[in-house]
Image (cartoon, helix red, strand yellow):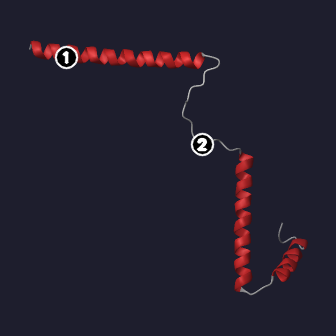
């Protein structure tokens, strides 16, 4: 019975020691954060991009996709770029494309 009691008390002491180490580490981290010129290496995720940047990237992606589709159709129907340009200008002037 004494063996179990001493093992249990050692386990409790070990838990208490680990808790104190954790508490000390946490307190040290808080002290570091309070320093005005502290340069902790806190891991962060990738940089946050603004909504305008994301919209610009989406617009560029749509533009590239449109150009790719247009070139594919031009090849498929054997249309020269001049006649496609005239068609696009006509559609634009009629308000069918922005």
Q: Is residue 54 left or right of residue 10?
A: right
- Secondary-structure class at tag 1: helix
Q: Position of residue 8 (x, y in %)?
A: 19, 16
Q: Nearer the viewer, residue 89 or 95?
A: 89
In the rendered view of the protein, which quadrant contains the N terminus?
A: top left
Q: Is residue 81 left or right of residue 54?
A: right
Residue 42 lies, with reference to residue 50, above or below; the image says above
The disc placed on residue 51 is none
Quadrant of the rendered image containing residue 60: bottom right
> Residue at point 71% right, 44% down?
50
The residue identified by callout 2 is: 46
Q: Position of residue 2 (x, y in %)?
A: 10, 12
- Secondary-structure class at tag 2: loop
The residue identified by callout 1 is: 8
Front: mark 1 or 2: 2
> Hey, which residue is sitting farthest bottom in the picture?
78
Residue 48 lies, with reference to residue 94, above or below; the image says above
Q: Position of residue 54 (x, y in %)?
A: 70, 50
Q: Is residue 78 left or right of residue 82?
A: left
Quadrant of the rendered image containing residue 35: top right
Quadrant of the rendered image containing residue 57: bottom right
> Hey, which residue is sitting farthest right in the picture?
93
In the rendered view of the protein, which quadrant contains the C terminus?
A: bottom right
> Residue at point 23% right, 18% down?
11
**N-term mark: 1 or 2:** 1
């Amino acid at each position: 019975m004494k063996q179990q009691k001493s093992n249990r008390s050692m386990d409790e002491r070990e838990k208490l020691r680990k808790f104190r180490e954790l508490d000390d580490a946490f307190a040290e981290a808080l002290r570091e954060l309070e320093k005005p010129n502290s340069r902790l290496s806190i891991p962060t995720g990738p940089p946050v991009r603004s909504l305008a940047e994301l919209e610009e990237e989406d617009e560029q992606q749509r533009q590239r996709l449109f150009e790719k589709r247009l070139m594919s159709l031009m090849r498929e129907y054997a249309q020269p770029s001049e006649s496609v340009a005239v068609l696009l200008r006509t559609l634009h002037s009629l308000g069918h494309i922005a």
